[in-house]
Amino acid sequence: MKKTEKRILVFGGSFDPPQNGHALVLREVLKRVPCEKAIIIPSADRLDKLIGTSGTDRFEMVHRMCSECIPEFLYKVEISLIELTRGKPSTTCETERELKGRYPGSEIAFIVGSDVLPEVRTKWIEGEYLWGYANFIAYPRKGFSLGTSQCIPRNTDILEIPEALTMEISSTDVRERIGKGESIDDLVPASVAAYIRENGLYR
């Protein structure tokens, strides 16, 4: 792991909704990785994925998750509308280039799960560029081996987070439980669960 404060961590995702797994990853990465700041980016629609929940709702839920779950790191966390205000489907390359322009001289590093790394080169838009030049901070996902170095983008730092500190939850699990009328209190922060109930989301 490179020891540098001149690093901007980027944690992107649909956060539809943000759940305990997101909070845990963010906490463990911030504990282990020196950085200038961490930018959380609720994603806009992508060419391969449309998001049904508004950016406003997802932004507010991410804010609540951070306030509740990582209060000690709030001084270095920013929740960004960079993709939601772009007005079109977004790509990682566009976001990286815009952040490089905003933070000249800082390293932009994307936080991703180990399950995502093998897909960067072959499935992401401008994947060859990202594989060769973008920076990644990878956390372990159960059942996903990192395999050979040929599958891993060149500029990747692998975090050694004990499996006990990872949580295999998906936002799809949360939405499905809500659709069935089941409790989500063990899957999302309490403040996020309250927001979902108050606004009738995912029903």
Image: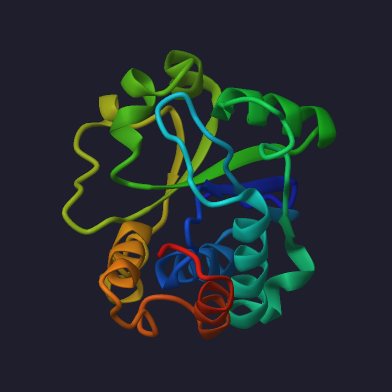
Relative side of 20 to 101, left or right: left
- Percent coordinates x, y for residue 161 in the rendering: 37, 65
Q: Quadrant of the C terminus?
A: bottom left
- Percent coordinates x, y for residue 75 in the rendering: 79, 70
Work out whether 144 lies above or below 62: above
| Residue at 48% across, 46% down | 52
In the rendered view, how is the structure colored?
Answer: rainbow
Of residue 89 and residue 138, the one placed in the foreground of this image is: 89
Is residue 104 shown to the viewer in this render? no
- Percent coordinates x, y for residue 116 in the rendering: 34, 39
Work out whether 135 lies above or below 200: above
Relative side of 8 to 11, left or right: right
| Residue at 48% across, 43% down | 51
- Percent coordinates x, y for residue 192 in the rendering: 54, 75
| Residue at 52% across, 72% down | 196
| Residue at 32% across, 56% down | 140
Is residue 51 shown to the viewer in this render? yes
